[in-house]
Amino acid sequence: MASRELLIEDGSLCLIYFDDKRKYIVRASRGAVFHTDKGVIRLGDLIGSPYGSTHRTSIGIKYLVLKPLLVDIVLHGFKRKTQIIYPKDLASIIIFSGVSSGSIVVEAGTGSGVLTAFLAYLVKPDGRVYSYDVSEDNIRVARRNLELAELLPYVTFKVKDIREGIDEQDVDAVFLDMPDPWNALKASYNSLKSSGILVAFMPTIVQVGKIIKALYRHGGFIKPLIFETLLREYKPSVDELRPRTRMIGHTGYVLVTRKILFNSLQGQNN
Amino acid sequence: MASRELLIEDGSLCLIYFDDKRKYIVRASRGAVFHTDKGVIRLGDLIGSPYGSTHRTSIGIKYLVLKPLLVDIVLHGFKRKTQIIYPKDLASIIIFSGVSSGSIVVEAGTGSGVLTAFLAYLVKPDGRVYSYDVSEDNIRVARRNLELAELLPYVTFKVKDIREGIDEQDVDAVFLDMPDPWNALKASYNSLKSSGILVAFMPTIVQVGKIIKALYRHGGFIKPLIFETLLREYKPSVDELRPRTRMIGHTGYVLVTRKILFNSLQGQNN
Amino acid sequence: MASRELLIEDGSLCLIYFDDKRKYIVRASRGAVFHTDKGVIRLGDLIGSPYGSTHRTSIGIKYLVLKPLLVDIVLHGFKRKTQIIYPKDLASIIIFSGVSSGSIVVEAGTGSGVLTAFLAYLVKPDGRVYSYDVSEDNIRVARRNLELAELLPYVTFKVKDIREGIDEQDVDAVFLDMPDPWNALKASYNSLKSSGILVAFMPTIVQVGKIIKALYRHGGFIKPLIFETLLREYKPSVDELRPRTRMIGHTGYVLVTRKILFNSLQGQNN
Amino acid sequence: MASRELLIEDGSLCLIYFDDKRKYIVRASRGAVFHTDKGVIRLGDLIGSPYGSTHRTSIGIKYLVLKPLLVDIVLHGFKRKTQIIYPKDLASIIIFSGVSSGSIVVEAGTGSGVLTAFLAYLVKPDGRVYSYDVSEDNIRVARRNLELAELLPYVTFKVKDIREGIDEQDVDAVFLDMPDPWNALKASYNSLKSSGILVAFMPTIVQVGKIIKALYRHGGFIKPLIFETLLREYKPSVDELRPRTRMIGHTGYVLVTRKILFNSLQGQNN
């Protein structure tokens, strides 16, 4: 089984790990080199080594080669065109949307493809992600990112304004990460299967206020769950165990709701 | 495709939704009834209705029938023997462990089977979860819960003390949710494939201090990521938008690290 | 000096302390009794005992008698007509307003008099608190509360709508704890001395949005500091040190700004 | 009354305010100049202007002159020898300690004198702060800082190790901001009046664990209140209202307890 192999092959993705701050995604490849401020790494030399082994750069600095998780690939290998969604938010978006192997989902906008990648990772091998963005540039970058993550086969990109309608019908979930998600409610409702999930991610509380108002006016959704998550990292020290001094204090708000049949609405909006 | 069907069948799991506070997991079933403080629900009557439709109890109170997500089944359908891991923690555990379809993972202890269920949900159909607990009672409850969630085929339960060793070799990840995870480090190291993931979940900071010390003494793992997450829910009101007055202020700390080959250790512990 | 005395006198305020959950404010008084679910306390018997001593109720349950701080009197002795401001918010309001002995300050509304009490405590003996409320009932309750806290001499209550104007001139600070603080900006500006402090406390983010807009439209104030504080309590246990499971997730938002001369405004609002 | 004056006099402290990021504490003074990256400020020119007025630097950049609060003087005028206590922590320390005009308090260590300044500000004019530090250097810096804040008359500095005993008796409160506060418990107990307040401020959770253990072993104190506070600032924008992306995630833990008479201890430690 693929996940059992321990040895790095030609073409394998690798996480080069010097320390917490210096991590890089590379592909083992005969003849290729990778330059870091700690010296040069000959990427062909990695082939045949086990993941988890230690190596040295051209100037003798040690590093580890680890098998990258998707979260590593996204954080250290993806090209970023736009503000990306943080792992803490991806995590809660995923768990409250119920997406899993086989799901058919829609997202807008594509951005740099971070959420796209995690959705593809979950729906594979039989599900599909339809990812809309009005920017061809975004989709070009996202496509390259998804290719790096080996998740391109599960995604269909569309250069299209989702506010004008979603082509897919009876989808399991719609994810909105766009400036004005309230303008995509009608398209989302029409595309979702009954009982399907709508998720919106918004940086400002002003947007949250607007989508709540639009949801109640539109009808056809249950009372939304709205939350933000905070991830607080600790210094892993025996003698000085404590949260890190600085943290990310805000990324965005998540809204989750579910489509219901239209004649089912009465009394749900309080 | 299974996820496309919209109509409730005999035997389908349903989420009965009166409001935020009153949600129930039931199975549509001819002849069966379900009693609530809002009246009786005839579970056979649900059959043939679409998910997302509205119904009325014997005393005329309206409710919705939704297609339950795993998070609904766990929160509203699982029997709880023990303190369960919250969705916010499941979410971050899952994203930082990289578990996905095909993964082979080990967890201890089973508890009520909540993490077991999410792991099974992710590794299916070809992966497997090996779940250890010293309590037969816990495993009995967890088995029933996993059966409800239709995830039992992907799990092997073991009434065994994980501190005495893990039977499985080269596993992708080990999850420790037990009072003394530091006593399972050696067994975890021996079971993990190189570059594999170790996750521990601990309610108290005292435990975090102990596992850090034990990790550094044991060696063979990269510097751990340690964090806690806070989920802050908002009142979905147009005119009174604000966080809810009360929140869960603490559940536990998550530690994530990765196995490295033993001769790779020098200089990783600072 | 008054604060040096250690013995309880006739008429002294006392904090009866059974445990964290059971604290009461009483006044030592010959012949009086206080009923608790742990038995009767004869309030005359406290006279002559030192603060910090242990006593027993009529049924033999032990309790401590402590010298109450203002925060004890407010939390355990004040009658509450309205939602009160929490200590964590009082603390930050006080520190960012710079109020101290001798300050002349205005607040609206009075509510139950909690902020009034802390302001009076700080401005005494030579300063003064002018407290406005449209409800005579609120002021009646607040007056009784301030009397209990022995702070009445430093407060002038006014049954008046602050939106129609503030009688006092050149005040050091104005505190707004009312549903529509934006409607009191003009009155506040006219009452404040130049460089004086304006503080508003608001439960909802909708209110924050409205006051920001009104501030920028009105002019005459520096860019506001807006924040919320979270207080996270820990279980004081050697073996199970951890944050408490439940916490107050939200009370309100604090806005602090300062009056500047009107011709000074240009370029401050970005 | 001093706080009524609106005009800047020779020798008045001023807060020079260019914007949120650029604030300076200066003293209006004939003939003196202050250099900034926005040009030179002639400090004599401020004399006679009202606080809250706008001025221009030598190169024409506008700035405001505000009357500084103590929090401004501490943050923008104090020389820092050591990590200082943040306003959010000062605020909660102050409110839960009940210190006010007339209180006699002890603190160790002095550090840069930030807590010293706030304590002096509260106890004046009749109370007193006794501030201990083993470092003469710290005290030299703190003395200069307190002088700037015009609070020196209310403070007695002592170059002495508080662990060896506190000279003052029957004090109202003791504040410990030192690496090993558990070693100062006995000295604190002996110095405090009965029912007096003990506060400790500690950056790491390891220290919290140690002081709890020491407190329970020592006896003579009620069950401590332990907490941390988080201050979350918002961007004051009408259209993009949201918390700031980065925040201070941790400063320290606060412990507050009260001395009780020694024969009063039984049953308080659970």
Image (cartoon, coloured by chain):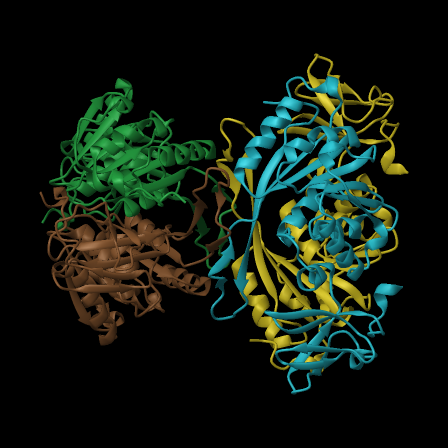
Chain colours: A cyan, B yellow, C green, D brown
Tell whether A14 sits left or right of C260.
right
From what the image shows, is residue A225 above or below residue C1? above
As drawn, C93 above or below A261: below
Inspect this view and state whether residue B79 appears: no
Q: Quadrant of the N terminus of chain A?
A: bottom right
Q: Nearer the viewer, residue C223 or A195?
A: C223
Quarter of the image for residue D173 reads bottom left
Residue sitting at 67 percent across and 18 percent down?
B38
Give the percent coordinates (x, y) of residue C133: 27, 23
Q: Residue at x 69, y 19 (%)?
A: A265
Q: How far across and down, in percent of the image, does residue B269 sit?
A: 59, 76
Horizontally, residue A116 falls left or right of residue D208, namely right
Q: Is residue C175 visible?
A: yes
Q: Residue furthest bottom?
A: A59
> Above or below — where is A12 with respect to B31?
below
Residue situated in front as seen by the camera: B265 or A137: A137
Instruction: Identify which residue, B15 or C108, lies in the foreground.
Output: C108
Front position in the image: B172 or C228: C228
